Amino acid sequence: MLKLDAAQKKNFDMAKVRRPLGKNRILAPYLDAALENFDDEWEFKYRPKEQDDAWHPSGDCVPPASALYAKALAFRPEEKRRLSAALTKIFTVGHFWHQLLQYIVVREGLADIDAIEQVGMKRWDLDEKIGLELINPEGIPLVIPAELVKPKPFHWIKGQGDIAPLITPNWTGLVDIKTMSENHFKLATLPESFALKYICQMNIYMELFDLDQSMILAVNKNGSHDFKEITFVRNQLLIDAIFAKWDFVSACLQKGIPPTPADDDKFALPTVAELNNS
């Protein structure tokens, strides 16, 4: 379990992690105003996600070190992801809402086109400033810039921001668009089963894009299609703990030594209940 002193526990306080800034006061009013009498011609294009050998903010923050190690060993880049009919429907609806809202945000001048689906990454397999040092056949040292060297498998993190950043007169930060069932949408807080996952995901996005604030823009996908904003502030302690776990698993993969239950305990993150009680 990650050990926290009193000052660190204070940084994990949920009121700070999810600081309320007023109900739907940031992006939702712009979206509702833009959708009033909306009659633009625009195109929706479904793009399946490409597989890669990076860790990802959406699913690799919370699992224990041993589960991440097993996932990396089982990775087969040549195998295409197969989806059921139900998942295809769910993902297609999600992509529709992403693209419509991203179009509106750019149209309204709240984000540059480059901020849409912006890719952020960090690696720890070589010096990012120096790159890869090689010796050519004549014995002359050469340096290949880091950005031209493919990262070692699972020695890097890659995240794609839906809007990174959104810029309004009173708020700047990353926006992650999520469609939610009505039961989850109506909750006063994050769904219990996803709370820690979402908190970690949003913090890693903030690290990748060097932002201090972020927001989940939830879309009720059952009937009303209302919007709800859930805001977050950056917690560097949590970010560092997640990166320490990834770095450890990367080292285990390189040495071929599986993480032990003791390692899982060492790199475990606080639960939401523990954060609430800290």
Image (cartoon, rainbow, N blue to C red):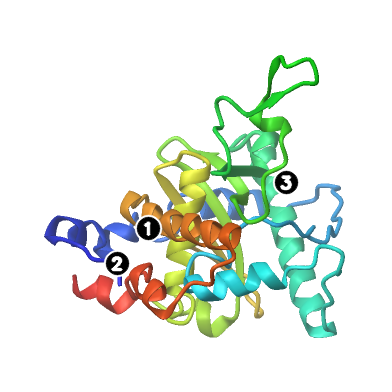
Residue at figure coordinates x 74%, y 56% from the top left: 52
Looking at marks 2 and 3 on the same chain, the residue that comes earlier in the sequence is marked by: 2
Evaluate if marks 2 and 3 touch, with contact meaning CB atoms under 8 Å apart: no
Badge 1 is on which residue? 241
Spot the residue most to the left.
6
Evaluate if marks 2 and 1 touch, with contact meaning CB atoms under 8 Å apart: yes
203 is higher (above) or lower (below) than 76 = above
Q: Is 75 situated left or right of 124 in this image? A: right
- Amino acid type indicated by mark 2: Leu
Within 10 Å of disc 2 (Cα), the crowding (few <14, some 14-19, many 20+) is: few
Residue 278: percent from left, percent from top: 18, 70
Looking at marks 2 and 1 on the same chain, the residue that comes earlier in the sequence is marked by: 2
Residue 74 visible somewhere in the drawing: yes
Residue at figure coordinates x 59%, y 62% from the top left: 253
- Amino acid type indicated by mark 3: Tyr
Q: Is 276 situated left or right of 165 in this image? A: left
Residue at figure coordinates x 65%, y 75% from the top left: 221
Label 2 vs label 3: CA separation? 41 Å
Within 10 Å of disc 1 (Cα), the crowding (few <14, some 14-19, many 20+) is: some
Label 2 vs label 1: CA separation? 8 Å
Q: Is mark 2 on a helix, strand or loop?
A: loop
Residue 136: percent from left, percent from top: 77, 21
Residue at figure coordinates x 53%, y 55% from the top left: 28
Q: Which mark is residue 2?
A: 2
Label 1 vs label 3: CA separation? 35 Å
Badge 3 is on which residue? 103
